[in-house]
Amino acid sequence: MQAPLSPELVLVYPEARDQAIAQLPDFGWHTFVVRARAHADTPQERLRTLVAREVRASFDEAVMLVPWGLVAFGFVTLLTLAFTLVANATR
């Protein structure tokens, strides 16, 4: 059994480099295609991701509108109260 080659030796000695390349398994183009297909999302998964992203964005927008709605409600309530007080004072 042969000891593994260190990366430094492979970089320095061309014979060690050739030996290390010879020990590598044969990776053809089909290996990369198989790996890419294994990691690729199906159209259903992509659609699910897009829908989830849109729902989240809509929810975030709705949550950001709640404080403004409360401010508007408070402003209108105070304005109505002020007009009521002015109307009662002028009777």
Image (cartoon, helix red, strand yellow):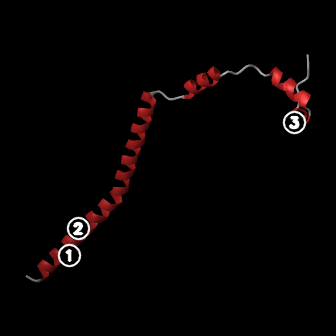
Crowding at dot 1, Cα within 10 Å, few <14 / some 14-19 / many 20+, comes out as few
Position of 89 with respect to 49 (left or right) is left
Q: Quadrant of the N terminus?
A: top right
Residue 81: x and y in percent read 20, 72
**Residue plotted at (43% across, 28% down):** 43
Per the rendering, the mark at residue 29 is none
Q: Is residue 26 left or right of residue 1?
A: left
Q: Are marks 1 and 3 in contact (CB under 8 Å)?
A: no
* Residue receiving disc 1: 82
Residue flagged by tag 3: what amino acid is it?
Answer: Leu
SS for dot 1: helix
Label 2 sits on residue: 76
- Quick one: 63 or 15, which is closer to the camera? 15
Q: Amino acid at mark 2?
A: Val
Judge by depth and name the residue closer to the eye, 67 or 84: 67
Q: Which residue is mark 3?
A: 11
Estimate the spatial distance between the alpha carbons at disc 3 and disc 2, rounded to whole Å: 77 Å
Residue at (89%, 31%) from the top-left corner? Answer: 14
Residue drawn at (41%, 33%), measured in percent from left and top? 47
User: Quick check: 81 above or below 49?
Assistant: below
